[in-house]
Image (tube, rainbow, N blue to C red):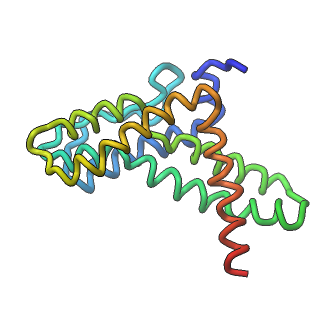
Amino acid sequence: MLIPGIVISALTFPGVIVHEMAHQLFCRLSKVAVLDVRYFQLKNPSGYVIHEVPKKSWQNILIGIGPFIINTLVGAVIASGASIPVFKFDSPDIFDIILIWLGVSIAMHSFPSTGDAANIWKSVKDPSTPILVKILTAPLVGLIYLCALGSVVWLDLLYGIAVALLIPNVLISLVA
């Protein structure tokens, strides 16, 4: 089923906002100046963070993968309070449904964009990047591109559902 990206972005706007906030957060943490931010807009791109060119390759890599870390964690935490009752008690209320939508929409925007991957790849190719960083980061860039391609077949949605619904329940099952 082909649904325009703008519609997906509108339906999952919290994920777009958290994605851009994660980029901005990692800019701040790595001391890279942010020049402009658009957390959400109803056009392509649905959000962006423009920042100065990082002086070190590790800064660029962190800024690029920041949304994967933040969106995954935030999506799982927000949805966990609702996904457990849905799976264990099978009686969701409207608040549970809203929390699950919020968690899934945030988690499904975890994947860095192809633009993020291009920026990370530029850092990997930089001669000043240490060889260990290149070895660890090169497969990550390939994975980012695969995930971007997978979005055509709803891999981002499947990831969001797994993070928001399955992970909290697996963790509870391990602990309980």
Q: Quadrant of residue 7?
A: top right
Left or right relative to 27: residue 2: right
Determine which quarter of the picture holds residue 165: bottom right
| Horizontal side of residue 109 vs 32, given as left or right | right
Q: Nearer the viewer, residue 92 or 115?
A: 115
Quadrant of res 142: top left
Which image quarter is the N terminus in? top right
Instruction: Please state which of residues 164 and 39 is positioned toward the viewer in this rendering.
Output: 164
Residue 18: image location, x then y, percent: 49, 46
Residue at the outermost bottom position: 176
Q: Viewed as shown, does residue 43 lie left or right of 20?
A: right
Front-most of residues 130 and 20:
130
Pinpoint residue 148: horizontal percent, then vertical percent: 49, 31
Which residue: 61% across, 45% down? 159
Q: Quadrant of the C terminus?
A: bottom right
Q: Residue at x 45, y 48 (%)?
A: 68
Vertical position of residue 144 compared to residue 59: above or below: above
Does 151 sit above or below residue 5? Answer: below
x and y percent of residue 71 in the render? 50, 50
In this view, the residue farthest toward the left is 128
Query: What's the residue at 54%, 23% (across, down)?
Result: 42
As drawn, 100 above or below 119? below
Q: Position of residue 173 (x, y in %)?
A: 73, 73
Position of 106 compared to 28: left or right?
Answer: right
Tell me which residue sits at (76%, 65%) in the image: 84
Number of labelled discs?
0
